[in-house]
Image (cartoon, grey):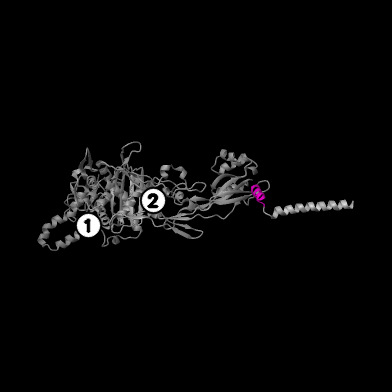
Amino acid sequence: MKAKIISLFIFIISLWGILLARAAYLQFLPHEKLNTLQARQFQTVVTLPSRRGNIVDINGKELAMSAPAYSVYVDPKALENRKQTAQLLSKYLTEPYAKIYSKLKDKDKRFVWIERLVASEIVDKLKEKKIKGLGFVEEWRRVYPNDYLLSSTLGFVGKEGQGLEGIELSLDHELQGESKKVSLRKDAKGRPLLQDGMVFKETPQGKEVKLTIDSDLQYFVETEMMQAMKKHEADGAYAVVLDAKTSAVRAIVSLPHYDLNNPQKFNSNNRRNKSVTDTYEPGSTLKSFILADALEKKIYTPDSKIFCENGAFKIGKRTIREAEKNHAQGLITVSEILAYSSNIGTSKIALKLGATEVQQTLKKFGFGSRTNIDMPGEAKGIMVGLPWSDHLLANVSFGQGITVTPLQLANAYASLANGGYLNTPHIVESITDLETNETDKLKERPSTKVLSDEVAAQMKEMLVGVTVKGSGAGARVPGYVVGGKTGTAQKISLNGRGYLKNAYIGSFAGFIPAHDPQYVIYVAIDHPKKNGYYGAAVAAPLFSSIASYAIRKDGISPAATLAENAPVAETAEIASENAQAAQDEKLKTFSDEQLGSLSSVLTSAPELKTLSLREAIQKTAEKEIKLKIIGSSGRVYRTSPEAGEAFGPDRNMTIYLKE
């Protein structure tokens, strides 16, 4: 009996020993299969977006940032009353009852998202309800502090934190950073173990992107363009402001725009960055590049004279005409062809160059290919392949039969302003890793010399002449010398061949200050229906306003722009002042009797009514009169002082223009 008891005791002790050894083995030694089973039974892992990096302007002002938010989830198996829970959640969240209830019906699911990125005040109210099985996860939501500002360029993100359009899309990898995984622990019955309904975990940080944009300038340009769009009842408005020397984008506008914090409320037309993605015929702004190549090839000089056929030039069975009958010209110089925007003069120069040369010239200035700016969706424009008929060649020379983007045109004008270098435009200044403080300044962009220094200087002077005595008078900036070119183009019909009736795009491309350009500015008004449609009327005044703000914002005084190395061409006011000084010196040599006989001529205002702007400038220049112009185009309908009235001591005269 004693032996049986001892044997039983040993057996039990051995059994307990085996159990303890097995328990120790399971507890202390790794076992992949059991670890996997444990993780599946007691943990669930949810992938969440990291804190997205900020987007800032050139001065560090935030354009896009990430703010704390909370996402709501439910463990359906832990819920006590699914219908009641769905009804309660639908009162506080944007999701409807039916959609929420459909997520809660499956009892076997242990984790379902109800709604992402919910405001903290809503979460606080839900926490007060103390619903069993309801949890919250801290995340980050994208916030755009300036609402509409730079909207089509910045783009926006989806609810999962991924970039969907614009810079948010093109630099999504850098901004997003590493993904974040959150582990939710569960008890033996599969219920989440929560601490106040929250899961806290250190969040990885995406990189910060600094743009070349000046947000103050961007705001001013957008405001001016919106006012112009409203004034002219236009379909849209576009603007590009570049650093003249580097082609860094300082402002870029595409209207209509949209609220970045509510992008779902706007259609794709509002969200598209038309300054980069859309193309249209440029009109007369293209003439500058035809003339530049003619000077470069030394076929003509700025003073070469070309007969402009008095307004009608026949090519084969077709006739090229000027935009308006009163623009008809006879024998004028190449500089005047640009100033008066002569279609016939430009056509004759293009025919002299030939189709192959003209096409190569346009390609040299970047037309027909992408600029390779660091923004998504860029269009390259349309350039018809050779051969070209003479009529098509003539049309292309004054901006028909070819399409360009606003960005392409602005960048091409930058090459005329900066001494002949075609740069690669860019909008990203740098990318910074905030965890390591390492800043990646992007590599130097390609630049190509497309014009000689001599021709680039000649073109600057000729473009200044456009604002002095030509179609660009409305672009003048008081106290500064500016250069540029107007453009008026018919809108192409998208539903068939030809053009839309009475639909135009009025534009102006130019630079300031002329002696040392800091900014190149391109503005365009799409289909203005009121108060004119010519570029001289709708776009040139916009350039003046934007250029004036930009140059004064930089603290460049008017006196600084009138340096010794300023171009020969002058504003009308400066030219009159210089002429008056010369006249005063000349009058010192006259006797009192001679001065008396000249008195009535020198002190009486001439008759200018019904004259064109060009004719009025010529007539007043002959008499050394300081001229002030009100209006951007048309003919003189009123003057002050009126014809025959005496001048004041400063010999000022104001003329008023009307279409």
Residue type indicated by callout 1: Ala
Q: Position of residue 83 (x, y in %)?
A: 61, 39
Q: Which mark is residue 372?
A: 2
Q: Is residue 493 visible?
A: yes
Image check: 299 left or right of 35?
Answer: left
Q: Position of residue 589 (x, y in %)?
A: 12, 63
- Residue 318's quadrant in the figure? top left
Image check: 85 left or right of 235?
Answer: right
Q: Is residue 532 visible?
A: no
The verdict on residue 36 being magenta is yes
Which element type, helix, strand or loop, lies under badge 2?
loop
Which element type, helix, strand or loop, lies under badge 1?
helix
Q: Which mark is residue 575?
A: 1
Q: Hey, which residue is sitting farthest right in the picture? A: 1
**Mark in the foreground, 1 or 2:** 2
Between 75 and 228, the one lying in front of the other is: 75
Q: Residue at x 86, y 53 (%)?
A: 6
Q: Which residues are magenta?
A: 31-41
Q: How many other residues sit within 10 Å of disc 1, few (<14), some (14-19) or many (≥20)?
A: some
Report if the CB atoms under discs 1 and 2 are less than 8 Å apart: no
Q: Residue at x 14, y 63 (%)?
A: 588
Residue type indicated by callout 2: Asn
Q: Earlier in the sequence, mark 1 or mark 2?
A: 2
